[in-house]
Image (cartoon, grey):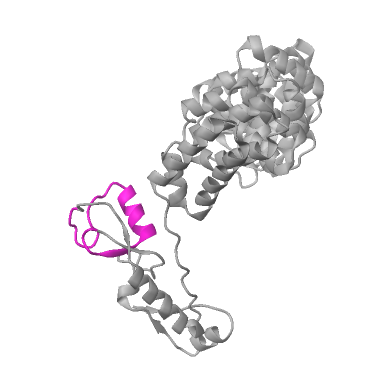
Amino acid sequence: MVFSWKRKGAAQEKLKKGVELVIPKQFLCPISLDLMKDPVTLSSGITYDRESIEAWLEGGSFTCPATNQVLRSLDQIPNHSLRRMIQDWGVANRNYGVERIPTPRVPVSGIQVSEVLLSLEDSVKSLNGLRCLELVHKIKKWGSESERNRRCVVANGAIRVLAAAFEAFARDSFESNATLLEEILSNMNWMFPFFQHSLDTEAQARLGSQDSLRCLVWFLKCRDLSAKQDSMIALKELASSDQKHAEALATIEEVNEVLFRFIKEPICPTITKASLMVIFYLLSSPPSTSTKIKSEFVKMGLVSLLLEVTVDSEKSTSETALGVFDILCDCEEGKEEASRNALTCPVLVKKILRVSELATQFSVSAIWKLSKHEKEHEVNVLVEALQVGIFQKLVLLLQFGCGGETKEKVTELLKLLNPYRARLECIDSVDFKNLKRSF
């Protein structure tokens, strides 16, 4: 195979003159056809790059890609001789822009992970913070080395052990164990994406305990940016896994004030977005819990703040802000505050068909709820909505198609708007220029 290496400087000049570098065939992975960085040999005797063959095996194939032979074993034996040959070849051809392949680290095994986790559990029982910190650092080091290591660590139940450790040391003392607790939380943070639907049940119970929740909120108030971000992500994962965790979080003192401050005085986009998500889940709790929370957030000024956030934010943040705004419009205080705000109708109408299907649903729902407010506010909302072009957008929404509940609200809004159209309607032509369905 002929391969042209691209690199700045002398090597690049040589390539411009037509010099081409031939990579020995035995150095290429049979799957990716790229130069191997970590060659491993299967039971069939064929050598592949570790990353490529692991992807093949994880896809459910148990045969050798080159020979189609059923593998007697899934063990991958490092081919050190071939790896050294590839490294020597890279050094010999460095003038052509070839960088030497670094010696790969040996992947961690399930047995190694299990041993460390058992030691961690023993250290937690005796509240040996120094030993726990040492073991947590070891897990962090493994995770930083490769995706394979991260999968191996998670598959062996690390998040359950770490969550139990977090709860134990949080119960003992936030302040005394702050460094260890931050390291544990940092480790769990990179493990969350491996749980696509919800966290492990035992990990949820440990991380969602009153001791753990109080510690997480304390981090939000008292620790540095990194700890705040990790804590906010953990709370978001918990709240999204089970509504009961949102209800438990609602009982923690000052949590509403902390979440509101992160939106009013943003310090990090990740924290802002996660805060909105947590608020969304808090407000989605049963009425016995959420009614008071809604009232508190409205009094803080969240309704006006959400409109400001929605104007300038990227898609996902805007969606969540609209979702929170829609829920706040369920209570009378929220409707009252939204009706008085001059930005309400322009912002909500602008977001219809402009952000996403979900944002459109939230915007339509909020306008529909406001139209059901007291009579004088209903007229004001309908008039303002007409003046910023809602009628045309609702008609387009029906033409594009929308969900059953949204369709009912759109139809009802059109009926309510119709009597005011002749004398009040105003079309913002810029808003419809090159309009395409955004979802």
> Which quadrant holds residue 367?
top right
34, 340: nearer the viewer = 34
- Residue 307 seen from this side: no
Q: Identify the residue shown where x is 79% and y is 13%.
A: 376
Q: For residue 15: magenta?
A: no
Q: Is residue 210 left or right of residue 82?
A: right
268, 156: nearer the viewer = 156
Q: Is residue 168 left or right of residue 257?
A: left
In which quadrant will I find the N terminus?
Answer: bottom left
Q: Position of residue 139 (x, y in %)?
A: 52, 46
Q: Position of residue 171 (x, y in %)?
A: 64, 25
> Which quadrant holds residue 253?
top right
Q: Is residue 190 left or right of residue 367?
A: left
Q: Identify the residue shown where x is 46% and y is 51%.
A: 147
Eyeballing the image, is 116 above or below 329? below
159, 237: nearer the viewer = 159
Q: Which residues are magenta?
A: 43-70
Q: Position of residue 53 (x, y in %)?
A: 33, 57
Eyeballing the image, is 415 above or below 61? above
Residue found at the far bottom of this picture: 17
Q: Position of residue 353 (x, y in %)?
A: 60, 37
Q: Identify the residue shown where x is 71% and y is 17%.
A: 293
Eyeballing the image, is 81 above or below 394? below
Q: Is residue 272 left or right of residue 156?
A: right
Residue found at the far top of this picture: 288
- Residue 36 seen from this side: yes
Eyeballing the image, is 67 above or below 382? below
Q: Identify the residue shown where x is 58% and y is 24%.
A: 208
Residue found at the far left of this picture: 69
